[in-house]
Image: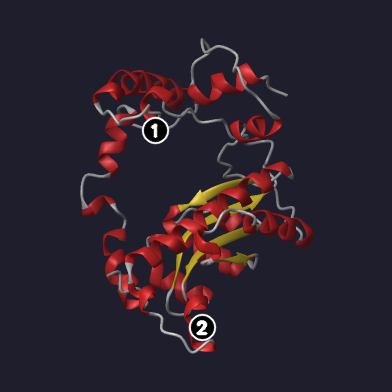
Amino acid sequence: MPTSKQLIAARYGDASLPDPAAWSPVIEHLLSHRSVRAYLPDPVDDGQLAAIIAAAQSASSSSNLQACSVVAVRDPVRRAKLAELAAEQHFIAQAPLVLVWIADLARLERLTEMTERPDGALDYLEAFLVGAIDAALAAQNAAAAAESLGLGIVFIGSMRDKPLEVADLLGLPPKTVAVFGMCMGKPDPARPASIKPRLPQSVVLHHERYSLDAQVPGIEAYNATMVQFYEQQKMNVRGTWAVHSAKRVAGAETLSGRDKLVDFLRARGFELK
């Protein structure tokens, strides 16, 4: 089992960092996270799934609206189709379980019908954000819970590449949308995943007031850290993390079809006023 100092060093790619002054089993568990894309065929059983979803539902929810849902996909044909729709990422088909997290306003709309009350607030951007944030909070709880059971996970943003096709495949009603997926399964020990370094705290942690200029030294240090990580992992990434990130936001052509998301959401009943 790695020590707290080793986990901090791995998370920030800096072996010179001191042993953390505060620590707990929960922090140790969270710092051990890594994205897993290689799985054994062992199923995630119903008992494990029920516990993971209970953990997910224990996340905070805005006004207790619980404006999210999740679709568990085990069928290999459907998983293969999801992999095809999500940028041909074949590990999606390999994972024994794919959870698709849904921003869900359809249930709230149904509640207004049941109680014979108006639902005009569902047409505003705030309502969609509540659903997306609820889904993200629940999914992060699910990820931590799954990892505590010895499972591995990876989030799949490419569920938004072809959202109409994903909605059709999963039978999603209007006022629902898949915001991301999550592959889940027992990690393949023959293809272990590594902890990916994150930005230094000097970049992301601000005291009292935000500063862009103060982030520059930390970003430069992180560029060097990630060059080493890319080489160690034999990842074909050209340029620094800053260059790689800038390329990802260069224009609509870099969004893999997600530049049309507003049009899709409105077609699905999200007015986004």
In the displayed structure, does residue 47 sit left or right of residue 232?
Answer: right
Q: Which residue is identified by label 2? A: 110
Looking at numbered disc 1 in the image, what kind of residue is underneath it? Asn
Res. 56 in view: yes
In the rendered image, the quadrant that contains the N terminus is top right
Q: Which residue is identified by label 1? A: 236
Q: Position of residue 117 (x, y in %)?
A: 46, 85
In the displayed structure, does residue 110 sit left or right of residue 33?
Answer: left
- Against 252, residue 174 (above or below) is below
In the displayed structure, does residue 271 sit left or right of residue 102?
Answer: left
Residue that appears at 49% across and 88% down: 113
Q: Nearer the viewer, residue 178 or 211?
A: 211
Quarter of the image for residue 51 reads bottom right
For label 1, count other residues whose C-alpha is less than 10 Å away and answer few (under 14), some (14-19) or many (20+).
few
Looking at numbered disc 2 in the image, what kind of residue is underneath it? Arg
- What SS does tag 2 mark? helix
Q: Position of residue 91 (x, y in %)?
A: 55, 51
- Against 10, residue 95 (above or below) is below
In the rendered image, the quadrant that contains the C terminus is bottom left
Q: Earlier in the sequence, mark 1 or mark 2?
A: 2
Q: Count how many numbered circles sit on residues in the image.
A: 2
Distance Cα–Cα, label 1 vs label 2: 48 Å
